[in-house]
Amino acid sequence: MAEVSSWTMADMADLAPRDVFGKALIELARKNERIVALSADLMLSTKLKDFAAELPGRFFETGLTEQATVGVCAGMATCGLIPFFATFAAFAVMRVCEQVRTDITYPKLNVKIVGTHAGLSMGPGGTTHHATEDIAIMRSMANMTVLVPSDSIQTVKVLQCAAEYEGPCYIRLIRGLESPIMIYESVKKCPFEIGKAATIKQGNDVTIIAAGSPVVQESFVAANELEKEGIHARVIDMASVKPIDREAVIKAAEETGAIITVEDHSIIGGLGGAVAEVVVEEKPVPMKLVGIPDVYSTLGPPAELWARYGLNSESLVRTIKEFVGKIK
Amino acid sequence: MSEENRKKLVHELEKKAIKLRIMTLEMMRDSEASGHYGGSMSVMDILTTLYFGGIMRVSPVNPKWEERDRFILSKGHACAALCPVLAEKGFFSPDILPTFNKLDSPFGMHPDMNKILGCDMSTGSLGHGTPIAAGMAMAGKYLKKDYRVYVVLSDGEVAEGSTWEAIEIISHFKLDNLCATIDRNKYSLDGPTEGPGILGERGIEGTMTLEPIGKKLEIFGWHVIECDGHNFDQLLDAYEEAARVKGKPTMVIAHTVKGKEISFIEDKYEWHYGQFNSEQYRMALEELNNKLKQLEQKSV
């Protein structure tokens, strides 16, 4: 039997290579004393532990009281603070759904909800810990901004923009250990802004629109593979799912004539739905929505789950070839 | 405050609370609104004490004044009581009250902080106010401000899980700048909170047992004051005592009567929500005006 290393939750929190969220938030908080952070007994998992250690007095551990914690954030925001509340996406959206809607988006309060471990990234955690409905739920709330960064650098940029933006934000992060591919070179060169998409690969045969990790990376790899077969796919990183960059979607529809959306989320109401809403109104073209079908996801290692649901680059190459073949 | 001045204040509050009840009824009558008569009448003396008894520090000319005490009507369905209170306090003209419940009115069944001047939080969904109050109190400590946070709950919403989460949070963070009040009128929508339910033997035993609510809260680390929620002397004492308590939050359990001061709806769960006809408005207003007259004639 192979030697298995011994580790605890605390070690994992320290060893995680992409604990950018916790670090970036410390930087932002040092520049703005109104930023505070809250954890409902998940600071080790959400990487807020460093924040708590670095900025005592500005971190509030509220225990397993997610619903009340959202209310606490709302109350803090009415008094001028900018609370960042991080917990697993499944709880940050569904357990507290009405509190987010009634206490934060309805009065339009400056609260940032950070849903970590989104999509299937909790792998063996299974359905209770997968979040494949969060984008659909959050983007249906008026006044809510929904941001889905794809790599560490964009995560930093998204956090900066969210902190500067006055209003409710949902920031969707995955577990943070999965894709080693960096799309953006540096925070300075990362073109992210709220409401704007980034075209990370040019092409005029078909457009792939993706949001979040690892689907943006997988889409990028798939598009480069397709180049070898003479299919020139455009790849758009739609990290700002709401407000969506309508112009980028319309341009893609006009210039490439076909759009495929890729997301680690249900195909109902997520990025695919958001893109389709623009396409049907502005420039109807054939679309293909790739994501989790209308089922509860099974459990397993994340990479195998993404492969199961067609979200890895190999599956995407096949799906895109088939889609393009059918319509062109 | 001298004993004499205190007596004068109590007398002023007694008159004010009747006047405010008249304003609520006239507002609802003139806007032809249906509404929450029972809970609006039971909470009125609590609101009157907080806003006119020298308890809360607010600034009608500067509603968003950062140093103001915060108020959350967690039982948002008593908005029909809150609106006249804020108008009488001077946040806006009472002339606009008759738009209540009408299309695009700032006032309706539940308060909206972005439409009603002087309203610190939008409420209406029960169990939300106490967590929000906790956040305001935590922000006050963080920002080193000395404002106090007041939240008024219905007794029914004490059952909400989020209320208990907040009760724990408030105690855990020792938020002595927070004072909550339960408007303990003993009824929620489906009938009495405890004891035989409205269907008698065929039915349920109350909607949800609160008692012994005082003991429960004490075990959760709160300072608890029980008082008659229609006795201004006791209400003033309760809030003054709460402000002196250090290291823990205070819950005022104000024992009230649902529908207070309108005899034909007092203690009648049916009048949690409804609509008076013109005869009922006439009767209720006559009763309140007579009471006001008696109070005005009373020498202190």
Image: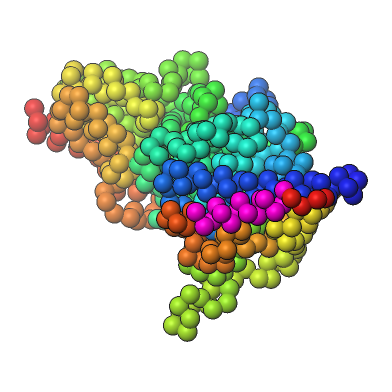
Residue under the image location 41 percent in, 46 percent down = B32
Residue B147: x percent and y percent?
Answer: 74, 37
Name of the residue lying farthest toward the bottom: B201
What segment carries the magenta color? B282-296
Q: Number of numbered discs present?
A: 0
Tell me if B161 is positioned left or right of B46 in this view.
Answer: left
Residue under the image location 23 percent in, 18 percent down = A251
Depicted B99 relative to depicted B176: above or below: above
Name of the residue lying farthest toward the top: A189
Image quarter for residue A278? top left
Q: Main secondary structure of the magenta part?
A: helix
Residue B9: x percent and y percent?
Answer: 79, 46
Magenta-drawn stretch contains B283: yes
Asked if residue A7 can be seen in this view, the reply is: no
Name of the residue lying farthest toward the right: B2
Asked if residue B147 can be seen in this view, the reply is: yes
Residue B88: x percent and y percent?
Answer: 63, 37
State the residue in front, B214 or A184: B214
Image quarter for residue A71? top right
Residue under the image location 20 percent in, 24 percent down = A282
Magenta-drawn stretch contains A54: no
Residue A88: x percent and y percent?
Answer: 50, 47
Tell me if B297 is positioned left or right of B290 in this view.
Answer: right
Residue under the image location 29 percent in, 54 percent down = A295
Depicted B296 relative to depicted A178: above or below: below
State the residue in front, B231 or A252: B231
Colour scheme of this structure image? rainbow
Q: Report the quarter where the C terminus of chain A lies.
A: top left
State the residue in front, B132 or A31: B132
